[in-house]
Image (tube, rainbow, N blue to C red):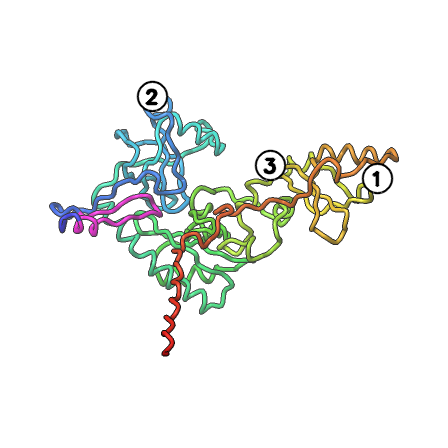
Amino acid sequence: MDDVSAINENIRFDCFRGCSVTNDAKTGETVCSYRQGCCKLEVYNWLAGVNQEQYDKYFEVRFKNTRKGIYVNGSGQSIKTGELVIVEATSGHDLGIVTLEGPLVARQMKCRGIDPETTELRRIYRKAKPFDIEKWQEAIARETDTMIRARQITAEMKLEMKIGDVEFQGDGTKAIFYYIANGRVDFRELIKVFAEEFRIRIEMKQIGARQEAGLIGGIGVCGRELCCANHITDFQSITTSAARCQDLSLNPQKLAGQCGKLKCCLNYEVEAYMDAQSRIPHLQEPLEFEDGHAWLMKTDILRELMYFSYDKGSLAELFPVPAEKVKEFMAMNKKGQKPRSLKADQETGTPEFISAVGDDSISRFDEVRKKKKRRKPRRKPAEG
């Protein structure tokens, strides 16, 4: 049991890069293993085992967070998924993990608009050696301290920006600073200060609040992992009209996510609601019946039910009417005809709201305590 706990303590998981890091007790070398499914950019290779020679030299290589690219194997070595490789970079070289190979890489290239005949792809130099991995881990160890110090420098220079994350290149000579800013920021002087402070090449990359939440991660109000940290890579614009068409309460505290922006999941069911609303008539005036006017009080969009009441200011007595039936009533009113009554054919009802526990009482788990009967005091016999 002690040996197992010692092994577990020796393993360090790097979910930002999708690998686990261990130290070999015999050789003392640092060993990095690819962990499939650890990153949101994971692509399931459903064409695994299918060989096509024209795609054998193309590989997908992943780096930290949401950064990955297509590279050409120029080393002549046999490279497989999960191996660490040294790749070409703008300056120097970088270290990444091969996450995809085979014909599916061609489909990924087509999705990204990459034509291998016209686009000049960067090369894979060779497989990573233990020395490269050690240097890579040393660079990774500097990221947290560099980010904290970078935030202090931006605060001292009073720049309206926030350093969200720092990613070091595999050779430790360059770093990407991910920053968040509402407006345009002139950080030319900041780059000079960073270069003098950290003695590395600097690259600034702006990200949004949703991308920052995806980098940090967390649990949403639904109890699941944040969508931006799990699978979303293309962040689309979200407006309050998405909440309005779903008949949601326009409460900013409920509609906002952990990033402070509108929740990405508001867009998930918009198309279904828009399709259902296209079959629901737009009613501005009350319907005329023989026994009076009926006002629209509530609409169940997905069930395509419209609830009417004869009392404009009360929700006590509602009559559910299908949307198709409402269209017939509107056509009759347009011709000057009045339908008989809503009360004759159907019973009153209210919109159904079912809780997670159904109709059971929340006190059903409580133990029922029996009341003890009080004993009546015995009457003393009368003295004669």
Horizontally, is 28 left or right of 90 in the view? left
**Are discs 2 and 1 less than 8 Å apart at CB?**
no
- 20 in the magenta segment: yes
Q: What amino acid is at disc 3? A: Ala
Q: Amino acid at mark 2?
A: Asn
Density class for disc 1 (Cα within 10 Å; few <14, some 14-19, many ≥20) is: few
Q: How many numbered circles are shown?
A: 3
Residue 305 in the image: state x and y as whole percent. Answer: 67, 38
Element class at badge 3: helix
Disc on the earlier residue, 2 or 1: 2
Tag 3 or tag 2, which sits nearer the N-term? 2
Q: Going by the image, does 342 lie left or right of 149?
A: right
Estimate the spatial distance between the alpha carbons at disc 2 and disc 3, rounded to whole Å. 40 Å
Tell me the number on the disc at residue 290: 1
Tell me which residue sits at (65%, 45%) in the image. Answer: 350
The verdict on residue 305 being magenta is: no
Q: Secondary structure at mark 1?
A: loop
Q: Which residues are magenta?
A: 5-23
Which is nearer the eye, 329 or 283?
A: 329
Name the foreground residue: 53 vs 375: 375
- Tell us which disc is closer to us: 2 or 3: 3
Residue 213 image offset from top left, x and y in percent:
45, 52
Q: Which residue is mark 2?
A: 51
Amino acid identity at mark 1: Glu
